[in-house]
Image: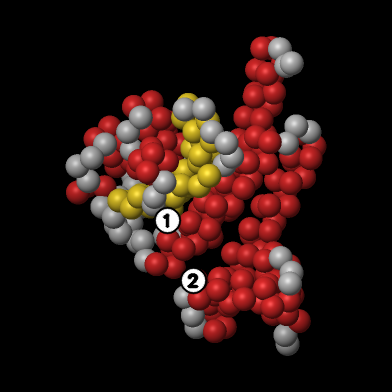
Amino acid sequence: MISDDGLGGRVQAENALAEWCLGDFALRAASHLGMRSECSISLRRDGQNRRSASSSERAGHCDDVENRDLEGGCIEAMDQLRVVLVPDLEAEESWPAWVRASLDAGFRSAAAFPAYAGAGAEIAFNVYSELVDPWDRDTIVRADMYAQQVGLVMSLVLDVADLETKLEMFQRALAAQAAIDQAIGAIMATQGCSAEEALTILRSAAGTRNVSLPEVAAAVLQGLGDRP
């Protein structure tokens, strides 16, 4: 049996590792999504909500307001397990404290993408944008893909005991997601298709070759790099 002190230390170690690795994840996601956005990740575990990581302090503060008041887009996304889009924060009448914090931080729209992270745990991948209603289908598909990846990463953090193993898995997951996102962008540019269609092409190739999605993404990027 793990003592209270031991359990507390383990939770602190998990929290520190998640914050460090997912902070990098949030930064990369914000950069890849563009649209003058910032990203944050909130975790609900055993009924307790907290911010796990963010690409900036202003995005993190918005999540902190949500988790304090238990009201906001990411709370509703986790409660109902559905994507919550707020096209124009100035026109949003729900969750006044969170909306005001988001507007004060310089954002004009937001979205929350939920994902399962293991027994008794959910995450919300939150995207804040300085633009009004930038949520086209390609952006939604890519953001939701990030949310599902974060859910997988968090499930590793919560389930794996060895911290070195966790760190290695984190790094692999981050590298794999970056390769997939870059491959989607490359296919969109060369084939003139949407992000959803590019992801379908990658998945089809992975199934045909019986390899993983990151392996197909790496092969696509290598093939483009070999072109004159």
Q: Relative to residue 9, is residue 79 depicted above or below?
A: below
Residue at point 54%, 33% (across, down): 120
Which x, y percent locates residue 7?
68, 18
Which x, y percent locates residue 22?
60, 42
Does 166 sit left or right of 181 as displayed?
A: right
The N terminus sits in image quarter: top right
Q: Quadrant of residue 212?
A: bottom right
Task: Find numbered disc 2 in the image and state the secondary structure of the residue it sits on.
Answer: helix
- Closer to the chain start, of discs 2 and 1, is 1
Which x, y percent locates residue 38?
46, 48
Q: Is residue 74 something that shows in the picture? A: no
For mark 2, what is the residue? Answer: 196
Q: Amino acid at mark 1?
A: Arg
Q: Nearest the camera: 196 or 63?
A: 196
Residue at point 72%, 85% (across, down): 227
Q: Amino acid at mark 2?
A: Glu
The C terminus sits in image quarter: bottom right
Q: Relative to residue 145, is residue 187 depicted above or below?
A: below
